[in-house]
Amino acid sequence: MSAAAPRVGFLGLGIMGAQMASRLVGTGQNVMVYNRSVAKAEPLRQLGAAVASTPAEVTSTCDLVFAMLADPKAAKAVAMDGPDSAVAGIAARPASAKPVTYVDCSTVDAATGEQVGNAITAAAPRTGFLAAPVSGGWRDARDGTLLFLCGGHQTAYEAAVPGLDAMGSRRWLLGSTPGDAARAKLMLQVMMGNIVGSLAEMMALSKAAGLDEAAILEVLGESAMANPLCKAKGELMRKNDYKPNFQVYLQQKDLRLALQLADDLGVPAPISAASNGQYIRARQMGFADKDFAAVRAAYEAEVMSEPETEDA
Ligand code: NAP
């Protein structure tokens, strides 16, 4: 890595962001990172990244900036809130500086994507914005095999390509607005939330029926319903191993956003609504920060509760 190489910025070092930023460092980029909780930036510092104390420091220094934040509230806070925000850093750059391209990889709703995109592009002339939520987990981020679902102008997309290709194996420009990417990503999250909800239901039912859970999962794995998600999450459910990969609070956020979209469009989404209720229940049971396989606990709660007697 050359100290003179242009810096790539990274905002948000959670489970995904830490791996994505590490991947950028590992592929030879000159990286500057920011995270709200400073301790999470320390491993990146050890790898050779510069650590900023505000989003503005990153966007005032770097021409290409990626963000990977929890939800709409976080994406807006980092991009737009106050003198430390990404927008403020872009506005503070000298007029002669290269225009910034800001790439938001967070999973958000279309309205948030448009709002953040408008604020970023209004901060200084020729600033680019790309929404680029991802499919894939932290291992894909580590290995550079994420799938990027992009929405924005072609120029912003092309400016982002070196970073996207360092962190991912496939990318699609799905439309010219951030909302195009946001809506597409929510389609995947509907499937994911419902598949894992359905798996949790099967596991709770298997247990209540006195079946061998390992055997049921083995048969499932050989059947027409086999898929990598059920294989991975079924094993975690069987072992009650809920160390976070993708957390319950994030899957529930995605179903909430998808249900809002369905409501706006007048599309019934009864399966997602039922799954969402179970993820909410898992949150209430204290599993918010656990892997979303822990939604099994919400189905167990149903199974374990005592049936009411006739005269109760
Ligand atoms: P995470 O581990 O919970 O990290 C969330 C990040 O957002 C942290 O950097 C956190 O900062 C930051 N944040 C939260 N609220 C904030 C606020 N108000 N102001 C500033 N920063 C804030 O989540 P993750 O798993 O990395 O997921 C990040 C995004 O990727 C989410 O949109 C998620 O839906 C999506 N995603 C996740 C996966 C996955 O497998 N995990 C896969 C695909 C997509 P602190 O450290 O200070 O809390």
Image (spheres, rainbow, N blue to C red):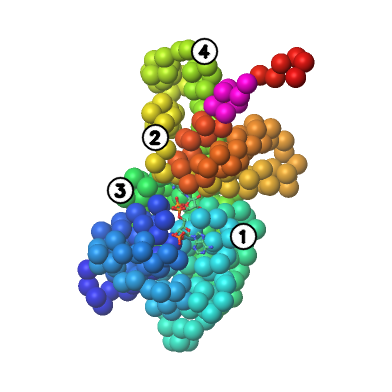
Q: Amino acid at mark 2?
A: Asp
| Label 1 crowd (10 A; few <14 / some 14-19 / many >=20) | some
* Label 4 close to label 3 by CB (< 8 Å): no
The first of marks 1 and 3 along the sequence is 1
Q: Quadrant of the N terminus?
A: bottom left
Query: Most extreme residue toward the top, as rendered?
Result: 210
| Label 4 crowd (10 A; few <14 / some 14-19 / many >=20) | few
Which numbered circle lies on residue 209? 4
The first of marks 4 and 1 along the sequence is 1
Does 284 sit above or below residue 89? above
Q: CA distance from mark 4 to mark 1?
A: 45 Å
The first of marks 1 and 2 along the sequence is 1
- Percent x, y of residue 293: 47, 35
What residue would you read off at disc 1? Answer: 112
Q: Secondary structure at mark 3?
A: helix
Front position in the image: 162 or 133: 133
Q: CA distance from mark 4 to mark 3?
A: 40 Å
| Label 3 crowd (10 A; few <14 / some 14-19 / many >=20) | some
- Percent x, y of residue 172: 47, 50
What residue would you read off at disc 3? Answer: 143
Task: Indicate which label's residue lies in the foreground, 4 or 3.
Answer: 4
